[in-house]
């Protein structure tokens, strides 16, 4: 049964955030302060060795400190889990839920869920991973469903919403794949979608605003960046092919109330400048969207 469509909101109600994976050269406290000082209303916090390591021995103390910092800066938060070398110093993103031994990934995601609960995160986001060459497609899909079910058990117990992100080049790379996975899991209430706006332009068959409407009932987390068709490269706004006012209008029409967080993981070298430019761009696009009748 399809969930009822959310009530519309105005584009002016959309809240912008910034991903801490775009502040990799900053201490987390400093990154949060810069994001808040610029005027963002939230952060997409990637758990990593230098930004709230989920395997740190004093994790509870660190999570509590970050929670106090977020509250003091009045920043909302979503938890992201795309750290590159957190689990394996030799292999990017390994192991995933698709590998022969997915236990480290499952443990990481369970920890992320518990951290999200402690921080009051609006969602915890994760993805499938790239299928290893030695793993047959059917086996990979079975492993993904089993891994997601294990993480869902933790999310249900913690009262946390999951946002599964279709990622170009991974086993689940588009909205159609996300729909298959959700159905395979039994359409669980806490299994929503993380929609990266750039990914929609990169590979989805529908125009980007239509992608938003396609998943409106299950949209729990939005990442935003510019991109070109067929090229999975996160670009600053204006460097790609996306017309953003219609996208923001679509998010408002969909009733989306979560964070819209800038996702520029390769721009840490100029993070404060890029973050400032990004917010200026998004605020102008939001104003244009508000001026355009629905």
Image (cartoon, helix red, strand yellow):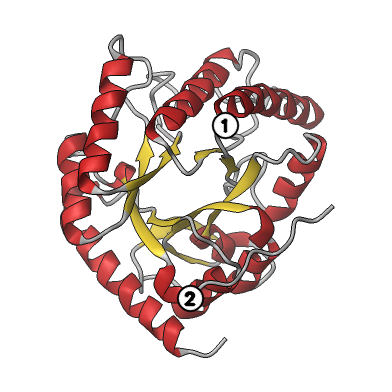
Residue 36 visible in the shown view = yes
Q: Which mark is residue 21?
A: none
Mark 2 = which residue?
A: 10
Tell me which corner region of the image, top left, top right, bottom left or bottom right, holds residue 170.
top right
Horizontal side of 185 relative to 108 (left or right) equals right
Count of all numbered marks drawn on residues in the image: 2
Horizontal side of 172 relative to 162 (left or right) equals right
Closer-to-camera residue (201/64) = 64
Horizontal side of 95 relative to 1 (left or right) equals left
Q: Is residue 103 above or below residue 210?
A: above
Residue at the spot x=47%, y=44% of the render?
Answer: 122
Closer-to-camera residue (177/12) = 12
Residue 271 visible in the shown view = no
Q: Earlier along the polypeptide chain: callout 1 or callout 2?
A: 2
Q: Which mark is residue 159?
A: 1
Q: CA distance from mark 1 to mark 2?
A: 28 Å
Horizontal side of 237 relative to 127 (left or right) equals left
């Amino acid at each position: 049964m399809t969930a009822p469509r959310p009530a519309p909101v105005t584009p002016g109600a959309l809240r912008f955030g910034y991903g801490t994976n775009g502040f990799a050269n900053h201490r987390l406290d400093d990154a949060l302060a810069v994001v808040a000082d610029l005027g963002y209303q939230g952060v997409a916090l990637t758990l990593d060795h230098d930004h709230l390591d989920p395997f740190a021995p004093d994790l509870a103390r660190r999570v509590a400190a970050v929670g106090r910092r977020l509250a003091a800066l009045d920043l909302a938060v979503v938890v992201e889990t795309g750290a590159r070398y957190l689990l394996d110093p030799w292999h990017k993103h390994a192991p995933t839920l698709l590998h022969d031994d997915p236990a480290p990934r499952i443990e990481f995601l369970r920890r992320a869920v518990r951290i999200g609960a402690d921080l009051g995160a609006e969602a915890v986001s994760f993805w499938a991973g790239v299928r290893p060459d030695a793993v047959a497609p059917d086996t990979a899909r079975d492993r993904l469903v089993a891994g997601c079910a294990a993480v869902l058990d933790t999310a249900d117990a913690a009262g946390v919403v999951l946002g599964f992100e279709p990622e170009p080049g991974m086993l689940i790379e588009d909205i159609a794949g996300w729909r298959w996975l959700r159905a395979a899991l039994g359409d669980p209430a806490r299994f929503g979608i993380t929609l990266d706006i750039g990914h929609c332009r990169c590979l989805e068959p529908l125009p980007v605003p239509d992608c938003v409407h396609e998943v409106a009932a299950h949209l729990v987390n939005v990442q935003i960046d510019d991109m070109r068709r067929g090229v999975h490269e996160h670009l600053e706004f204006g460097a790609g092919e996306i017309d953003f006012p219609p996208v923001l209008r679509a998010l408002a029409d969909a009733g989306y109330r979560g964070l819209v967080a800038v996702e520029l993981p390769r721009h840490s070298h100029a993070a404060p400048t890029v973050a400032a430019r990004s917010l200026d761009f998004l605020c102008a696009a939001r104003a244009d969207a508000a001026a355009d009748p629905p």
